[in-house]
Image (tube, rainbow, N blue to C red):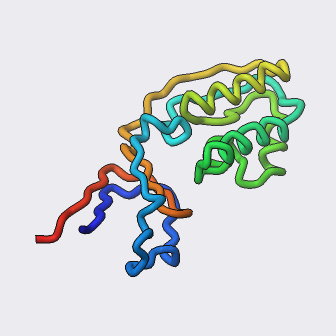
Amino acid sequence: MSLVFNGLEEGRLLTDELNPDDDEALEGFEVIPVSDVPWAQGCDWSIYCSGPIGEPISLFAKVHDYLRLSEAFFGPEHFLNEATDISRFVAMTKAGGFLVGRGPACIRDLICAELERQGVPHNVVRTITDTGPKFLVRLGHSAFLCQEALAELAD
């Protein structure tokens, strides 16, 4: 049998974990519809702040911790604007108006709850993204998104 994945998207594949002689190699293998994985859904929501964020590290930590608990392979930088560099993220949050982040509903709710806790004025805009991935594939410590996952039997 061959496993075929078409339309590969973001993720990580650790090939050193794959051993064809291992009888239990597929023990942790799973293919999950993206519709069942909140953090992997399309970034349909944009959150704009119209005032500075007093505790930007608290917002960053909320997104970080949620993603870790969800076993996501995305980090906060995938959803928070300018978050590839924490100092840039913090500097951005001192402005009077800015895009703080984009994400699916679960990330939107997380960001908005923290902004409300801090009393930061903000607006949410919905922009439907193009068709996204259909499946999340997990195998060992590897995980990636794809459009199609097939098992083909040898002739």
Image height check: is 29 above or below 79? below
Position in image of residue 106 (x %, y %): 59, 30
Image height check: is 134 above or below 139? above
Position in image of residue 74 (x %, y %): 60, 50
The outermost residue toward the left is: 155
Q: Horizontally, is 135 left or right of 71 in the view?
A: left
The number of discs equals: 0
Image height check: is 10 above or below 43? below
Front one among 14 and 61: 14
Q: Horizontally, is 151 left or right of 75 in the view?
A: left
| Residue 105 quadrant | top right
On-image quarter of the C terminus: bottom left
Front one among 93 and 142: 142
| Residue 121 quadrant | top right
Position in image of residue 139 (x %, y %): 47, 61
* x 72%, y 44%: residue: 64
* x 64%, y 28%: residue: 47
* x 83%, y 51%: residue: 87
Image height check: is 151 above or below 113? below
| Residue 58 quadrant | top right
The outermost residue toward the front is: 23
On-image quarter of the N terminus: bottom left
Position in image of residue 129 (x %, y %): 43, 35
Q: Horizontally, is 5 left or right of 47 in the view?
A: left
The outermost residue toward the bottom is: 21
